[in-house]
Image (cartoon, rainbow, N blue to C red):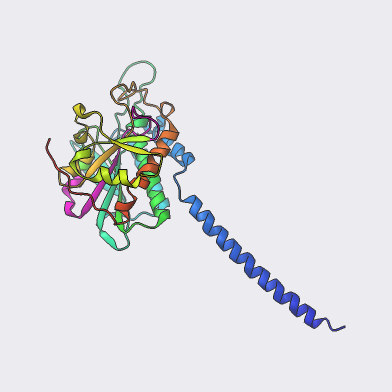
Amino acid sequence: MNKKPIFLLALIFSFISCKQTKNIKRNNTKVTQKKNISIDSSLVRKHLYTLSSDEMEGRKPGTEGMEKTTVYIENEYKKIGLKTFGDLKSYRQNFTHKGIKMSNIIGVLEGKTKKNEFVIVSAHHDHLGVKKSGDGDRIFNGANDDASGVVGVLTLAEYFAKSDTNERSILFVCFTAEEMGLIGSTYFGKGIDPTKFVAGINLELIGKEPKTGPKTAWLTGFDRSNFGKIIQKNLEGTDYKLFPDPYLKFNLFFRSDNASLARLGVPSHTFSTTPIDIDPDYHKVSDEAETLNVGVLTETVKAVAKGTESIINGKDTPTRVVIKE
């Protein structure tokens, strides 16, 4: 019996099977990649507990703890593959304020067809440092204020980098010295052309459930542009809702870093979830990671990703902000 034809048939069959297996693997890879484009609660937890740990010493500008925080954020930007901004040689935008050396930390995800139009995703990475005297815990860990916001910046940077659908360029910025009077964001605003900035997405105190209920957040300056209405429209069909700021008497629109850009006309607003009028941990040493709800934080960041998608993809452009202090 001639065995050559049988051998050839077996070889052909083996080749076809191999090819099919490779195709299946390719298809599986695609499916896996799709599943990985999400906001992972374990990553949220990791960032939160690292940024608000005692090792960071309350993240006061000019301290060793702040330097450790900066290095951590820089390393995350590098892992994600963000570029540096403008003429900067690194992710740090260095400056000095009242004799203290400070840095905003800026990473860029370049847009595809509208790379000269910028959306900024921001939070402040500074806090109050350490009490000079006293018994017991003296570290202001600032878990909710504003490690929670920085967690949002880092996870959104990874999410949008993996999604690879941003037509506009996204600046991921961790501002310094917000607690000293919006120092970092004010410095940043002086060096940009605000007409190129389409929207500002600022994250502040997003780790606790608000009075408006589960899977909700509120937005400062809601009536000053149509930014909030765009977010609400994009969240239709989900179980997450966005509400206007319920604390108008506190003038919160001008108390976070969004204000520095808003004063330049940029539709820049702050997302928050915390019931600040009854929050027992605000600016206290008790603002620890354990007091936050990682589920709330994760769901809020997911909602911000979904809600801002049409702005980042270039489909929607918010109206310029109206300033009337």
Closer to the camera in the image, 165 or 191: 165
Q: Residue 34 at what x, y percent from top left?
A: 49, 54
Residue most extreme to the front = 237
Residue 89 in percent (x, y) is at: 29, 55
Could you tell me which residue is drawn at 35 percent across and 43 percent down?
Answer: 304
Write the residue at 33% across / 16% down.
134
Identify whether 171 is placed above or below 251.
below
Instruction: Write the start and end of the magenta stretch as one range.
Output: 187-215
Single out the residue that lies furthest toward the top: 135
Q: Position of residue 112 (x, y in %)?
A: 32, 62
Query: In the displayed structure, would residue 277 be above or below residue 68?
Result: above
Q: Is residue 141 magenta?
A: no
281 shown above or below 17: above
Residue sitting at the far bottom: 2
Please identify the quarter of the rendering in which residue 258 is found: top left
Residue 62: percent from left, percent from top:
28, 36
Image quadrant holding the C terminus, namely: top left
Quadrant containing the N terminus in the rendered view: bottom right
Location of residue 262 by image quarter: top left
User: Residue at the location (44% across, 44% down)?
Assistant: 39
Which of 92/307 is in front?
307
- Above or below, 271 against 87 in this view is above
Does residue 60 appear in the picture of this structure?
Answer: yes
Residue 217, picture quadrant: top left
Does residue 195 belong to the magenta stretch? Answer: yes
